[in-house]
Amino acid sequence: MSRPRRIAHLDMDAFFASVELLRYPDLRGQPVVVGGRSVDAPVTQPDGTRRYARLRDYVGRGVVTTSTYEARALGVFSAMGLMKSAQLAPDAILLPADFEAYRATSRRFKAAVAEIAPKIEDRGIDEIYIDLTDVPGDSEPLARRIKNAVFAATGLTCSIGITPNKLLAKICSDLDKPDGLTLLDHSDMPRRIWPLPARKINGIGPKATEKLTALGIHTIGELAQAPVDFLVAHFGRSSGAWLHAAANGIDDRELSTDSVPRSISRETTFERDLHARQDRAALSEIFTSLCQRVAADLQRKGYAGRTIGIKLRYADFQTVTRDITLPAPVADLAAIRRAAGECLKRVPLDQRLRLLGVRVGTLTPLAELAQPPRERQGDLFVGLDADTPA
Ligand code: DCP
Ligand code: MG
C-alpha cells in the first residue's frame, strides 16, 4: 500500500497589514487597516515621530484590503468599504497598499519553505500548498520548522494545516489563525470539520451556499449526510458528486507544482497605421520579428505550444484574432511563422492596421516532450478555430 499523503496548506497571517507593521513597529497592537491611497501614507514629523492617517478622516469609495486582528475585533474585514469601517473603528490607522513590498515578502517566504520542502503549489501572494509526504520527520516538528523558517526569512507568522489532502488542509490552516498549527486526519472529521459552515469548503461560493441553505443544509456535516442522489438532483452530476466527496473529506488532487503559463505572446502597435498592400514589406518584417521574439520567449522559458494565433487591430480599433491548432507542439521560428502566416490569410486586410500580435498557446514544457518537435511541411494544419473577439 502506498504511504498516506501529508499535504500542508500555509497561509500568512493578516499578510499585507503584517508587512506594514514590520516597517511601522510602533503600530503593533493597534487596529490598522490597509487600503488607503498614497495620500494616506504616514508623514514623518520634524521630531522624528510619524503622523498616521485615521480611518475617520477618510472620504472616498475605497475598500479595506486587509486589517490587523485588532481591527477585525472591531468588525473591520477585507472588502468592507473604508467609510463604513470608519463607523466601526474611527481611530484605526489607515495605510496605503504597497504591492511591491508584499510581492518581495511573498517571494522570501516561499523560498524559505522550498528549502525544507521543495514540492510546493503556489496559490497566490500569501498561500501555498506543500506536499510533505516524502519529507522526513513527523508532521508537527516539520510544521514548526517551516513556521520558524518563514519567520526567520520575513519576521512574519503564518498558519499551517496538515491533513491527507488539499481540500482539508485549506480548511485546516484557517482553524487556529493567527500563528496556527493544526494537524488533522479523517478520523477528526466529525469533531473538527463537520460543525463548520458548508462555505468553508473551498469551491462552495456564495451562490452554492445560498442554494444549500434553501435545501436546509448549513454545515459540512449536514452536507456529508445528504444522499448523493439528492445533491446530484439539485446540482447536477459532477457538482453533486463533488459536494458529497468534499464534505466527506475526499480529495485526490495532486499539487500542481509548476505553473505552466496559458500562453506566450508578443504584440506591437505601429507608429503609424500600416496597410497590408502598400506597407507589405514593413508589415512582413514586423510580423517575422514578432514570431522571432515569441520563439525566443518559448525557448528561454522552456515551452512549446500547439495553438498559434494572431491578433490584428484595425485603424477603427476593431480587433480580430485567428488561431490554428497544430498536431504537435512547436517552439521554432519557422513553424510559428508558417502557422501565423496561415492565420493571417484568414483575416480581411483591406483596412489599415494599428496593431499586430502573435501568440502561442496550449503550452507543454519542452522537458516533457519525448523528442524535439519535427519540422514538417504541408500537412501541419489540422484545425481552425472560429473568431474570438479580443
Ligand atoms: N486581499 C485583498 N482583497 C481581499 C482579500 C485579501 O487584496 N478581498 C489581500 C490582502 C491580504 C492578502 O490578500 O493580506 C491575503 O489574503 P487572506 O485572505 O489570506 O487575508 P490575510 O492574510 O490578510 O488574513 P488572514 O490572517 O485571515 O489570512
Ligand atoms: Mg492570509
Image (spheres, rainbow, N blue to C red):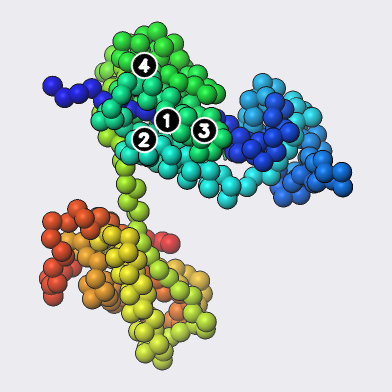
- Does the numbered disc 1 mark a residue whose Cβ is under 8 Å from ligand 2? no
Instruction: Tell me how far mark 4 sits from mark 2, CA to CA.
Output: 21 Å
Q: Which sits earlier in the primary sequence, circle 4 or circle 2?
A: 2
Marks 2/3 in contact by CB < 8 Å: the verdict is no
Instruction: Tell me how far mark 3 sits from mark 4, CA to CA.
Output: 23 Å
Marks 1/2 in contact by CB < 8 Å: the verdict is yes
Marks 3/4 in contact by CB < 8 Å: the verdict is no
Task: Tell me residue 122's x, y (percent).
Answer: 40, 41
Q: Amino acid at mark 4?
A: Leu
Q: Which sits earlier in the primary sequence, circle 1 or circle 3?
A: 1
Mark 2, Cα crowd under 10 Å, few <14 / some 14-19 / many 20+, is some
Q: Which residue is mark 2?
A: 116
Q: Which residue is mark 3?
A: 151
Q: Which residue is mark 4?
A: 184
Task: Tell me residue 24's x, y (percent).
Answer: 70, 38
Q: Picture quarter containing residue 353?
A: bottom left
- Does the numbered disc 4 mark a residue whose Cβ is under 8 Å from ligand 1? no
Residue at image coords 34%, 19%: 247
Mark 3, Cα crowd under 10 Å, few <14 / some 14-19 / many 20+, is some
Marks 1/4 in contact by CB < 8 Å: the verdict is no
The local secondary structure at tag 4 comes to loop
Which mark lies nearer to you, 1 or 4?
A: 1
Instruction: Tell me how far mark 1 sits from mark 2, CA to CA.
Output: 7 Å
